[in-house]
Amino acid sequence: MQAVMASDFAIAQFRFLTDLLLVHGRWSYLRLCKVITYFFYKNLTFTLTQFWFTFQTGFSGQRFYDDWFQSLYNVIFTALPVIMVGLFDKDVSASLSKKYPEIYREGIKNVFFKWKVVAVWAFFSVYQSLIFYYFVSTSSSNAQNSSGKTFGLWDVSTMAFTCVVVTVNLRLLMMCNSITRWHYISVGGSILAWFVFIFIYSGIMTPYDRQENVYFVIFVLMSTFYFYLAVILVPIVALLGDFIYQGIQRWFFPYDYQIVQEIHRHEPEGITRTELLEIGNQLTPAEARSYAIAQLPRELSKHTGFAFDSPGYESFFAAQLGVFAPQKAWDVARRASMKSRPKIGQKK
């Protein structure tokens, strides 16, 4: 008991190690790898767009994004979806994890957190940041708003930041193995939070000079077709490279868990009662009898491995105290099957 209290975690039986290692431990490893690499990707992408801007300003120190854009990027606009990945993402079910214990070796070899994996994420961060900055700035160089004025710095930066928020959130859905409604809610809510914020922030006039930079910017942008064209095309072009890479990797260089996914891809997740009856009508009498026997409830041992929970413990001490205690069914059957042996010299 002292060892249990002093340990980080404890298990009552060694058979619990199967779920602890092959299921929950492996899921935790995959989720942790995805969360860390995704944080690295989205922050590097966001920072590099400002880095490319410094080449056009002669390294003058002029900022590309508004201060509030930078402050809320990790706090609100991209925070919730990655939390959903860390909580709910799983590549295969618990039953398949125990059925194919070989996929646990990928965690031992650290397949999902090697320097090659980080290098791939870094490459696509550089690629997407180039798309965000140069695609938006080049396409907006000759663009004009409804007043006939060309787009300025804050128009271009707001449009680029919108593309960044939309793309990095959609990229998260591409890396998920299991997508639930919470993933859709978090991604859609993060993108919606950006638009709600920019509508309120750019629609309020304050005496601060920094806020005047983006005053009424979003309303001017949304009055032109350049904004909608950029928000639709830029994420598609930016994510096209990731889509091609994931397709090539899964087709020619699959991970072990991806092979398991393909093997069980067409298995039904849930069978209704009507479908079960239709399947039962197609079985032979012998198959139907075997299936019916397999579905019978079985009594499992529930004792935890401690000495006081051994079979027959209740009946033994109950007899000592003169109290009747019902015995377990399997214990009664075991005692009934035991034959008494006659003593030597005793007549049968």
Image (cartoon, grey):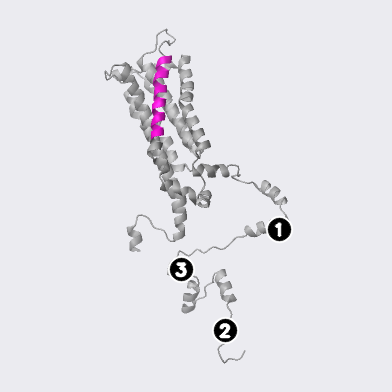
Q: Percent from the top left, x then y, of residue 61?
A: 27, 20
Give the residue number, with chain letter if any, for mark 3: 309
Question: Which of 254/260 is in front?
Answer: 254
Numbered tag placed on residue 286 in the rendering: 1
Say whether disc 2 or disc 3 marks the residue closer to the N-terminus: 3
Q: Is mark 1 on a helix, strand or loop?
A: helix
Question: Mark 3 is on which residue type?
Answer: Asp
Give the residue number, with chain letter if any, for mark 2: 341
Q: State which region is magenta.
A: 119-139
Q: In this view, does 289 lie to the left or right of 258?
A: right
Numbered tag placed on residue 339 in the rendering: none
How far apart are labels 2 and 1 at the CA level? 40 Å
Say whether disc 2 or disc 1 marks the residue closer to the N-terminus: 1
How far apart are labels 1 and 3 at the CA level? 40 Å
Placement of 295 over or under 133, stated as above or below: below
How far apart are labels 2 and 3 at the CA level? 29 Å
Q: Residue furthest left?
A: 60
Q: Residue at x 39, y 40 (%)?
A: 114
**Mark toward the viewer: 1 or 3:** 1
Would you say residue 65 is visible in this rendering?
no
Q: Which residue is drawn at 45% across and 57% down?
A: 16
Question: Mark 1 is on which residue type?
Answer: Ala
